[in-house]
């Protein structure tokens, strides 16, 4: 493995670990980290060994599961570009903002009609 390939693999591993930590702390706070790890095909000892010593790396299957089960952006995981959460979450946030905007406009119109 070339030095460039190794540094790229380390970066992917670090983002993988970052995503698992974010999932358990921010996105699914009621889900235990150990359950998330198992759902990604890791045994907890292997994951923590990877996290602490860096002696192993996530497989392509582990990465696929992470992205599909927890809506993590493949682009972010593989390259560090984009945001961690995929476009589906961004689209959902935009839809929520549109609904809030419509509600505010409706409330404002009701206030104007009452005057």
Image (cartoon, grey):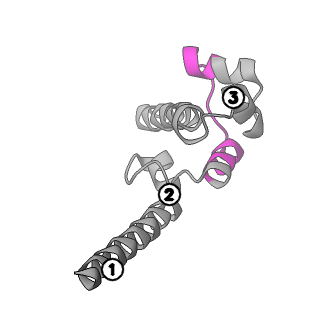
* Residue at far front of view: 115
Nearer the viewer's eye, disc 2 or disc 3? 3
Sequence-earlier tag: 2 or 3: 3
| Quarter-of-image position of residue 30 | top right
**Which residue is under mark 1?**
110
Task: Find the magenta span and give its range.
Answer: 49-67
Q: Position of residue 62 (x, y in %)?
A: 68, 42
* Residue at far bottom of view: 113
Q: Position of residue 86 (x, y in %)?
A: 50, 57
Say if residue 54 shows up in the picture. Answer: no
In the rendered structure, does residue 54 fall within the stretch colored magenta?
yes
Circle 3 sits in a helix, a strand or a loop, which is it?
Answer: loop
Circle 1 sits in a helix, a strand or a loop, which is it?
Answer: helix
**Contact, mark 1 vs mark 2 (Cβ under 8 Å):** no
**Which residue is under mark 2?**
86
Residue shown at the point (56%, 15%) measured from the top left: 52
| Position above or below: 25 against 85 | above
| Quarter-of-image position of residue 44 | top right
Q: Position of residue 63 (x, y in %)?
A: 63, 45
Residue shown at the point (43%, 32%) measured from the top left: 7
Nearer the viewer's eye, disc 1 or disc 3? 1
Q: In the rendered structure, find residue 32 and report the number of the disc placed on it.
A: 3
Q: CA distance from mark 1 to mark 3?
A: 46 Å
Q: What predominant SS class does the magenta segment belong to? A: helix
């Amino acid at each position: 493995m070339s030095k460039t390939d190794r540094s790229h693999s380390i970066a992917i591993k670090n983002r993988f670990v970052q995503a698992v930590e974010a999932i358990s702390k921010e996105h699914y706070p009621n889900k235990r980290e150990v359950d998330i790890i198992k759902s990604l095909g890791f045994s907890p000892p292997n994951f923590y060994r990877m996290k602490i010593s860096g002696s192993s790396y996530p497989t392509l299957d582990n990465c696929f599961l992470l992205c599909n089960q927890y809506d993590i952006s493949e682009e972010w995981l593989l390259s560090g570009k984009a945001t961690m959460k995929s476009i589906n979450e961004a689209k959902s946030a935009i839809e929520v903002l549109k609904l809030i905007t419509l509600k505010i406009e409706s409330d404002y119109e009701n206030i104007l009609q009452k005057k």
